[in-house]
Amino acid sequence: KKLGFERFETVLHAFHPWLEQLVQLGQLLTQSFQAQLTSVLIDELVSAYQPSAGVKSNAEENGEPIPTVFFPRKPHPNGLEVLLVATFITGHVKNNYQRLPYVTHTFPHL
């Protein structure tokens, strides 16, 4: 049995946390893992994104830039830029590498 589009949208929206919830979760995780930090890096990624005509017109009406960037060296050169703050967590790791990458924050370029 196929899942109807309206039902799919309802289920999908149930999994979208509020911004405040994401900030709180980030703060809790940062506090929990702060003692385990060995190094911090900042990276960028470009997620494939083509804004709709409605998004473009809303941005223009509000005097805001259209939320896309162009980086020719990226696999998806046109899209939404996201800055990542990441680190490695050491100790209490159950793999052979003895450290795991951990993204502490993401900042979409809007």
Image: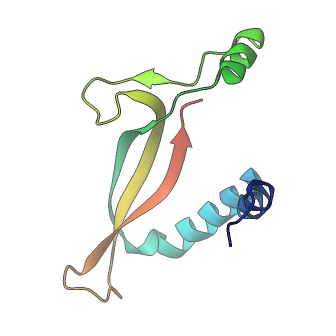
Residue 86, horizontal then vertical, whole percent: 39, 56
Q: Quadrant of residue 95?
A: bottom left
- Seen in the picture, residue 82 relative to 22 is either above or below; the reply is above
Taking the image as shown, residue 41 lies to the left or right of residue 26, namely: left
Residue 9, horizontal then vertical, whole percent: 75, 55
| Quadrant location of the C terminus in the rendered image | top right
Q: Report the front residue among 36 and 12.
A: 12
The number of numbered discs placed on residues in the rendered structure image is 0
Q: How is the image coloured?
A: rainbow
Q: Report the front residue among 31 and 85.
A: 85
- Seen in the picture, residue 19 relative to 58 is either above or below; the reply is below
| Quadrant location of the N terminus in the rendered image | bottom right
- Residue found at the far front of this picture: 1
Taking the image as shown, residue 4 lies to the left or right of residue 82, namely: right
Q: Residue at x 38, y 39 (%)?
A: 44
Q: Residue at x 67, y 67 (%)?
A: 2
Q: Residue at x 47, y 69 (%)?
A: 34
Residue 79, horizontal then vertical, whole percent: 46, 30
Residue 6, horizontal then vertical, whole percent: 80, 55
- Seen in the picture, residue 34 relative to 93 is either above or below; the reply is above
Q: Quadrant of residue 26?
A: bottom right
